[in-house]
Image (cartoon, rainbow, N blue to C red):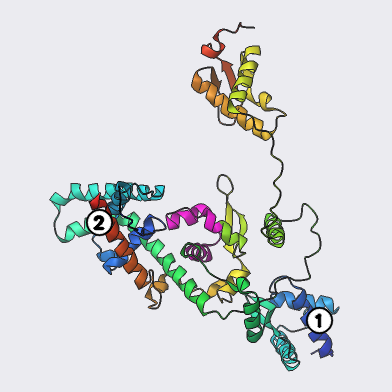
Amino acid sequence: MLRSSYTVRLPEFEGPLELLLFFVQREELPIAELSIARLVEDFLEYVRLMESLDLELAGEFFVVAAQLMLLKLHFLLRRPSTEGESAQVSELSDAEPLLERLQQYRRFRYAAAFLALRVRAQPIRFYRRAGLLRSTVVPLGQGSVEELLGALRRIRTRMGQERAVPLPEREPELELTEAVELLQQELRRRPVLRFELLLHGRPRREQVGLFLAMLELVRMGGATVEQTEPFAEVRIARRAAVEVADVPLG
Amino acid sequence: MFPLDEQVLLRAVEVLVFAAPEPIAPAELLQALCRALELPPEAVNAEELPGLIARLNEELERSGRPYRVVESAGGYQFAATEEASKWLHRAFPERARRRFSPAALEVLAIVAYRQPITRAEIDAIRGVQSAEVVHSLLERGLLQIVGTAAAPGKPPLYGTTPLFLQVFGLESLQELPPLEQLEQESQLQLFEPEALEGLQQQLEQLRRLARSQ
């Protein structure tokens, strides 16, 4: 615990590749001449630091950390048989996919830096954007998705912050417990149900609820599910489990 | 040249550019011009267009108008003169803001070079989720959906917009330098020197903090 008021600014990295790039950049060496082992150590140290301080890290960091640990393992296993130059070479060939990704990411970082430079060099100039054409109503069915999105964007801009776009009314939700109940009721009436028939005519939210209820019921041991092949009909069968045991078969 | 009244030609060009919701490409403008004046197609030569635009701009300048027809993002459109743009900038500073986060620039760079591209592909290159950044760039009109990929779920494919070209002062995507050449440009930096140092110091602080626990 920290008692004194002491502020620490956390280094902010967009993702694992940016962190790796930072370590590479710090060395001021071309990627081919890097010590991969050193890079791996630096990265893992950072992840450990953040963990030991209970600081949140995005999942992507752990994915790369796992890849790096695997890489490290390879080095360790290989080291005794090779030495000097050849060790460097084997290090590189193991690390190739990751280094390639890093190299690719680095190129786009340069491209981003190029764009940043361009935008700063542009004199601020105002262009006329609203035209007279295409301002007529687009008949329904002809508007592309982009046009509709564009229209929505314009409406939202025009309405400003104070008036939000009204949300469409939500369909009532089917609570999971209610859905399980419903499914059990149906199963009491008939021991085997065709899932599609059960969904028929119900609003989407209820369908989703029933699907989740089906999974839940299987998990609880109250039913079994059968589907002979992908996209084929789904059949739910009652199982004599706790919840349905006391119901007379009919 | 046809015995066409230049005044009529100029006025027609002017209103066509005025009416276009986006920069109007020279070829499109020529066709529209012929239709507008009921001329046979290709009655006006493509080479004549720059001259017409130049004369139109001379007129605008002579009469002291604060705007011109400019060629940008692959087409003609009206733009405020530099001086008038300064007034607009002062009057509406928020409309001239062109700040881009590092993440937004990364996504724009990736899409610019690799379009059409799916979000999953952008994520893979950056090693991090880009959904929010992509969404905000769509909102700002710098990216657009250009189709759908033939992959499961039919994910949308993204591309850059004419506005993107305009904001970054490019005539076309061909003006982007080859990706492999960019690292040789000495004025381009992956991290600003101060940022590099700042990050280094912050890492040191983290280490100290971890040790003191």
Q: Amino acid at mark 1?
A: Ala
- Across and down, in percent, residue A242 comes to 51, 12
Residue pointed to by mark 1: B12
Q: Quadrant of residue A202?
A: top right
The chain containing the residue under callout 2 comes to: B
The answer to if A232 sits in the magenta stretch is no
In the image, which residues are magenta?
A: B105-134
Main SS of residues in magenta: helix
State the residue in front, B143 or B113: B143
- The vertical placement of A117 against A89, above or below, is below
- The vertical placement of B75 against A68, above or below, is below
Q: Is residue A249 visible?
A: yes
Residue pointed to by mark 2: B208
Q: Amino acid at mark 2?
A: Arg
The chain containing the residue under callout 1 comes to: B
State the residue in front, A133 or A52: A52
